[in-house]
Image (spheres, grey):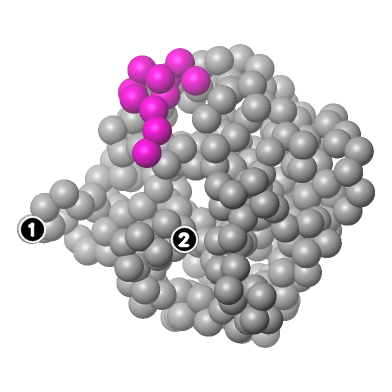
């Protein structure tokens, strides 16, 4: 299981799904099923649903965050949203560097780095996503790609700021494809990420940093993934849209898939 010093966390990323009412209904249904023994539960909801989701989640301890933000202070950026706006709406964290932002919206590591620093300045925690394409994986460049993303996206991030940071390994080839890294494959990358953090920010920082796995996470593979020593949590996409399937992932301790790692 994950190191006891790193409490497990399950994060749902709804992407461009759910209206305000759908979000509130989901949270109330899920919240009523949660127990004190469950891992910490977080939801990255659409901007429009942040404030009502925060209000709905308050009795259940569910943490609400955002899926992206601009790297600038409030200003003349039509259609964008600032970190201070997310914070005031009640968001506690923001996902940055997701592959869809990198691939579809041409966000570079440098842009992600600017957003990371703005998020910290605006008192938001960060979930930084990293991961390789299928072509990079087949060419044996997984570690090279992830090293580059982490070093550039987290340039000038301090040890103290790492207290407000989680890293999510999301292999691009596994997102929404029904493919998933085996527990052993995912663990190897998580070990590599922790070693990178150790080399750059020190053993203490590496030991406390939560590293999540994402990429076609489902109830059937959640337990096997979470059984690995360096997988501290899960970043869940499509399977987080249903309260029933997301609940099964949250209670991964009780779910035996029967699949060998």
51 vs 128, nearest the viewer: 128
Q: Residue 226 location in percent, x, y?
A: 78, 48
> Between tags 1 and 2, which lies in front?
2
118 vs 46, nearest the viewer: 46
- As drawn, 42 above or below 138: above
Residue at horizontal 72%, vertical 75%?
Answer: 192
Q: Residue 135 location in percent, x, y?
A: 58, 74
Q: Write down the quadrant of residue 253 in the picture.
A: top right
Q: Which mark is residue 87?
A: none
Left or right of 144? Residue 105 is: left
Q: Residue 208 location in percent, x, y?
A: 69, 62
- As drawn, 85 above or below 251: below
Residue bearing the label numbered 1: 76
For the view shown, which residue lies furthest in the left direction? 76
Q: Write down the quadrant of residue 45 in the picture.
A: top left
Residue at horizontal 40%, vertical 33%?
Answer: 17
Residue bearing the label numbered 2: 99
> Is residue 110 one of those drawn in magenta?
no
Could you tell me how far apart the alpha carbons at marks 1 and 2 are, in whole angstroms? Answer: 26 Å
Residue at horizontal 37%, vertical 73%?
Answer: 108
Q: Which residues are magenta?
A: 16-26
Left or right of 139? Residue 261 is: right
Asked if the residue at tag 2 contacts the one at tag 1, i.e. Cβ–Cβ closer than 8 Å, the answer is: no
Residue at horizontal 88%, vertical 53%?
Answer: 261
Circle 2 SS class: helix
Q: Badge 2, how many Cα within 10 Å: few under 14, some, many 20+? A: many
186 vs 176, nearest the viewer: 176
Circle 1 SS class: loop
Sequence order check: which comes first, mark 1 or mark 2? 1
């Amino acid at each position: 299981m994950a190191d006891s010093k790193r409490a497990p966390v399950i994060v749902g990323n709804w992407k461009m799904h759910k209206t305000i009412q759908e979000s509130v209904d989901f949270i109330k249904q899920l919240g009523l099923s949660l127990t004190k023994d469950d891992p910490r539960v977080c939801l990255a909801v659409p901007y429009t649903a942040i404030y009502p989701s925060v209000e709905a989640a308050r009795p259940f301890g569910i943490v609400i965050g955002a899926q992206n933000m601009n790297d600038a202070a409030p200003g003349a950026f039509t259609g964008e949203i600032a970190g201070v706006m997310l914070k005031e709406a009640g968001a506690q964290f923001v996902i940055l560097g997701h592959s869809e932002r990198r691939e579809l919206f041409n966000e570079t590591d440098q842009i992600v780095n600017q957003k990371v620093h703005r998020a910290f300045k605006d008192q938001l925690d960060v979930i930084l996503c990293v991961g390789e394409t299928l072509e990079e994986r087949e060419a044996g460049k997984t570690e090279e790609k992830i090293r580059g993303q982490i070093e550039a996206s987290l340039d000038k991030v301090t040890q103290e700021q790492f207290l407000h940071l989680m890293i999510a390994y999301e292999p691009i080839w596994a997102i929404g494809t029904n493919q998933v890294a085996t527990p052993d494959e995912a663990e190897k990358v998580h070990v590599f990420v922790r070693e990178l953090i150790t080399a750059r920010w020190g053993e203490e920082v590496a030991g406390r940093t939560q590293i999540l796995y994402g990429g076609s996470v489902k109830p059937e593979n959640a337990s096997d993934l979470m059984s690995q020593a360096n997988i501290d949590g899960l970043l869940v996409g499509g399977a987080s849209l249903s309260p029933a399937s997301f609940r099964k992932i949250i209670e991964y301790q009780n779910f035996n898939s029967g699949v060998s790692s």
